[in-house]
Image (cartoon, rainbow, N blue to C red):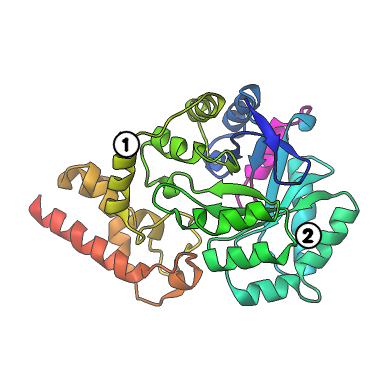
Amino acid sequence: MRTRELGKTSLFVSAVGFGGIPIIRLTFEEAGSVLRHAVDRGITFFDTANRYVDSEEKMGRAFAGIRDKVVIATKTGQRQASPAMEELELSLTRLGTDHIDLYQPHQVSKPEELDVLLGPGGAMETLAKAREQGKILHIGITSHSLEMARRLVATGLFSTIQFPYNIVETEAGAALFPEAKAAGMGILVMKPFAGGMLDDGDLALRFLRRDPDLLVIPGCDTVAQVDQAADLFEGETAWTEADEAKAQAYRDELGSRFCRRCEYCQPCPQGVRITYAMMYRVVAKRMSPAKAVAFAGETMETVRECIDCGECMTRCPYNLPIPEMLREHLEMYDGHRAAK
């Protein structure tokens, strides 16, 4: 596995990383096997977050005794100093380590959030102190807003920027990434499969492999997924006209109005299974109407409980009209039910 420095951090990392959300679906033993296999394949960068259920704890157990072989990144969703320090200490305990290589304020997408983060009593105060104490080595940041991400880069306060980038979400390539590179920042790519909407993993990763300055962090929960990523980033790859045609077909199908399954919209006060209901259009495309109804029926019935309160939209980093989209999917589902 090739390695390189992450921006100007002095952290040398593998050409591809490991995203820590999917391992929450695994037992501790299963997660440990996948994580250690990733290390065996030469993957050294592992990204997780305080809010990813037990992902940190699973990494902590898996890396016991081999902490020096891995670079760990985790995150806090807190914007103020005291709660951010509490989450940092909790992450250190869960990960079983005395330091975190890269610590990132999580999903900063609104100006008012940034004002709190950087203001008096904000999280950056305590993170800077933690860096002085050696509890964290570098401070990065993540966002889903292109405008905000460019503003974060311009502050000069962060060593890395983590942002969505994939076959159908390419806007960052034109402005954000060049600006981050010019600032000497490391670039972490999340959502390489567009939240699971891109079902051709090889195509999705080869698209990203073309820019060696990007550290792609695909989420993995199987040994086979680890091997796919490691094999592709170990060798050489090409991007053909046929590949571009496939990529364009995904763009034509998905556009920009689709759910990335980040799950920030949940939980719904009315019990609507928002994330999975937002997937119905894709499910229906890949199955017959009858099978789609049988597969997703229980989920789609919860959509009838939506009262259009709009709470989910206030949490969506992509500003999707979620209630409207849910109604569209429910109409499609009801049409499929009637045709059975």
Near mark 2 (Cα within 10 A), the count class, few <14, some 14-19 or many ≥20, is few
In the picture shown, does residue 128 fall above or below 199? below
Give 91 or 8, whichever is nearer the viewer. Answer: 8
Residue occupying the point 35% across, 76% down: 308
Taking the magenta stretch, the answer to whether it contains residue 275 is no
**Whole-percent x, y for residue 293 in the image:** 21, 49
Q: Secondary structure at mark 2?
A: helix
Distance (Cα) linking label 2 and label 1: 51 Å
For the point 50% across and 38% down, which residue is it? 210
Say if 189 sits above or below 64 in the image: below
Q: Is residue 52 magenta?
A: yes
Q: Secondary structure at mark 1?
A: helix
**Spot occupied by residue 97 in the image (x, y as percentages of width and height):** 81, 40
What is the x, y in percent for residue 318? Answer: 45, 64
Callout 2 touching callout 1 (CB < 8 Å): no
Q: Is residue 253 left or right of residue 272?
A: left
Question: Residue 313: horizontal and vertical position, in percent?
Answer: 44, 71
Residue 298 shows in the view: no
Q: Residue furthest left?
A: 339
Residue type at mark 2: give it: Glu
Q: Amino acid at mark 1?
A: Glu
Q: Residue at x 24, y 42 (%)?
A: 286
Q: Residue 82: which quarter of the image?
A: bottom right
**For residue 307, above or below residue 218:** below
Q: Which mark is residue 322?
A: none
- From this viewpoint, is residue 302 visible? yes
> To which residue does mark 1 refer?
241
Q: Which residues are magenta?
A: 48-66
Q: Which dot, 2 or 1, sits closer to the camera?
A: 1
Residue linked to disc 2: 86
Residue at 28 percent across and 60 percent down: it is 301
Residue 258 position (above or below residue 322): above
